[in-house]
Amino acid sequence: MSRPSETAARGRSVHRSTCPYDCPDACGLVVEVEDGKAVAVRGDPEHPWSRGTLCPKMVHYERTVHSPRRLVSPLVRTGPKGAGEFRRASWDEAITAIAGRFRSIVAEHGAEAILPYSYAGTMGMVQRNAGHALFHALGASRLDRTICTPAQDAGFSAVMGDTLQLDPEEAVDSDLVVLWGIDAIATHIHFVPRLKAARAKGARVVVVETYRSPTAALADDLVLVRPGTDGALALGLMHVLARDGLVDGAFVDAHVQGWGELAERILPEWTPARAAEVTGVAAEDLERFAHAFGRARAPFIRHGGGPTRYGNGAMSARLVACLPAVVGAWARRGGGMLCSTSSSQAFDTGIVQRPDLEPRACRTINMNQLGTALTTLDAPPVKALFVYCSNPAAVAPDQNAVLRGLSREDLFTVVHERFLTDTARFADVVLPATSSLEHGDLYRAYGSYCVQRTRPVVDPVGESLPNWEVFARLARAMGVAEAFYGQSSEAVVDALLAKPSALREAVDPSALAEGRPCQLSLPPGAKLRFRTPSGRIEILNPRQAHPLPRWIPPHSERGALPFRLITAPAVHALNSSFHERDELRERIGPMPLRMHPDDAAARSLRAGERVVAWNELGEATFTLDVTEDAPLGMVVAPGVFWLEHVPGARNVNALTSQKLTDEGRGSTFYDNRVDVRPAPPPADTAR
């Protein structure tokens, strides 16, 4: 709810809102509005998680909201696909054209020839999911939305079931905090104060990573693991815990299923020497880590998505999830493991998504394999693509295949966006979208247990519309799900809040209605209430293809090229978001590729020069950053750049594969190999 300031009489007011981006924190915002425009954005000091601070990306969010690059009207393509040539159109013309084309495609090819493509461009529960009901009612192909961390979810769930995840505030009470595969400074910045508070009370901090990330500076101990071998590291640690009597036998007997079988059948071969051979972690360092973990009173693992973006990602997460169980960490405050909070259980998303509207079971297309879907899929082929809350031309794997598909003249593409992104340039119709300050929604964090309702604080820029209104107009034009879309987005938020949830029992409804950030509450004793079929932590899970967790190599283990590629997060961008802001993009630098000095010397490559990374999928040109932050045999490429800002013709996703994870059908962005060569000198354009 808006909170007018003292200066409201002079045309200035202050309002609460929430960061809408795909980040665990969902920070609270305070937005100053003057003459109908947002003029300043700062952190909300009353937000229980972010406590008044923001990451560098959101400090000047008003520059994104009122960017001169914002799309302000519908556009219809006039030039070749990809050229970004359009004419202005009205909303009536655009909606009529989309509905007409959809009807003809359904008549000729069937509704499954239509594919929606969306992800987390906004994390608001209504606007993010606004299109689901329409496409379900049409009988369109379903999208398997698995580009982020479904393998992490699958691995954790194999051990812990549907157990409520740890409250991240408990990290303050831990005496050993392990950041495992998460660059918190880039992707979970408000966990850092909890980390520092724990350290101030005497805790040690261990960072497990594949390269020296910005977060490594916070570590007492940095454990650099070979990409894709996190599961082998966990096996080596458990071998030492078992060998040296560091297992909490009483906790295991009371709460754990299958430890004895794992210790007898799997762990004997995972000596420190064997684990060192696989992971690259020296045996003595592995033993030191195991002893610190086993002797800690309440070790806390904050597990990130990085280790699960490999072909063995689910198994890796499953093995790491065994560690807190073995030492009884769950029995003590400050101990356990957090992947993603269970705040989604506070709301029934079916109220928005309406899967019941689907007339029959429709085919599912994995979003990580969009390139294949657009170029080779048949029976029926994809003839229409509706993109919202995503930029697949930049962020999807195997960029060359995606761009080939988007270039098809017979593919009717609609993009609902705030900016003319790489994907929007290939659209037949572009629709202008609102920012989060221009529409209302309901947000829940996945790195804390905070929720917040927001309302619009500025008018829509130009003719832009929120997702809900666009799909409501299209539903009316198509004659489907009209009653559902006849309600307002505010009414849908009301419906989400009207359905009771145990996690929301302590939330003040009036505070939530007013737009104040609210904290969900975990039930008493939730940490020791293991929601698995057995009621125990299931190291042995008979429902899994491998009942006992074991080592599975990543896809890249069999690759022939010399360098493992890590597509790292960037501190000043979020996937392809924020590249509309020159000052943020310039802080990242001109699409860097980080390489160890010895590797650069072996190839006669120099810092600052342009290089080409390549593999069987394609190539991309980078500016070389020679640094010991990148271990030998690895190159690190932070950020996902728009094609207009790359030094060559492609970004890093020209090098990433459409292969999927072992479970969860997730992306394998980190499981690729490349080689690197000098870039040819730029062509002389002088005449």
Image: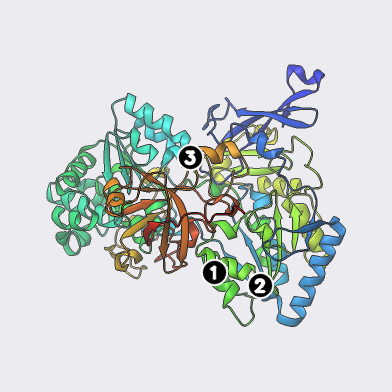
Cβ–Cβ under 8 Å for marks 1 and 3: no
Which is nearer the N-term, disc 1 or disc 3?
Answer: 1
Left or right of 275, for residue 79? right
Question: Please, what secondary structure does the residue beneath circle 3 have?
Answer: loop
Question: Please, what secondary structure does the residue beneath circle 1 have?
Answer: helix
Identify the residue under disc 2.
Answer: 408
Please name the residue shown 47% across and 58% down the image: 620
Which is nearer the N-term, disc 2 or disc 3?
Answer: 2
Q: Mark 3 belongs to which amino acid?
A: Val
Which residue of the protein is positioned furthest toward the front in this rendering? 687
Residue 426 visible in this rendered orientation of the protein: yes
Q: Mark 2 belongs to which amino acid?
A: Arg
Please name the residue shown 69% across and 60% down the image: 83
Mark 2 neighbour class, 10 Å CA radius: few under 14, some 14 to 19, many 20 or more: some
Above-or-below relation of 338 to 200? below
Q: Mark 1 belongs to which amino acid?
A: Ala
Name the spot of residue 639 as percent of width and height, x first.
49, 48
Q: Nearer the viewer, mark 1 or mark 3?
A: 1
Identify the residue under disc 3.
Answer: 571
Name the spot of residue 18 as percent of width and height, x first.
62, 37
Q: Nearer the viewer, residue 155 or 24?
A: 24
For the residues labelled 1 and 3, the Cα–Cα distance comes to 28 Å
Q: Nearer the viewer, mark 2 or mark 3?
A: 2
For the residues labelled 2 and 1, the Cα–Cα distance comes to 11 Å
Question: Please, what secondary structure does the residue beneath circle 2 have?
Answer: loop
Q: Nearer the viewer, residue 140 or 99?
A: 99
Name the spot of residue 668 as percent of width and height, x first.
43, 61
Q: Nearer the viewer, residue 603 or 428?
A: 603
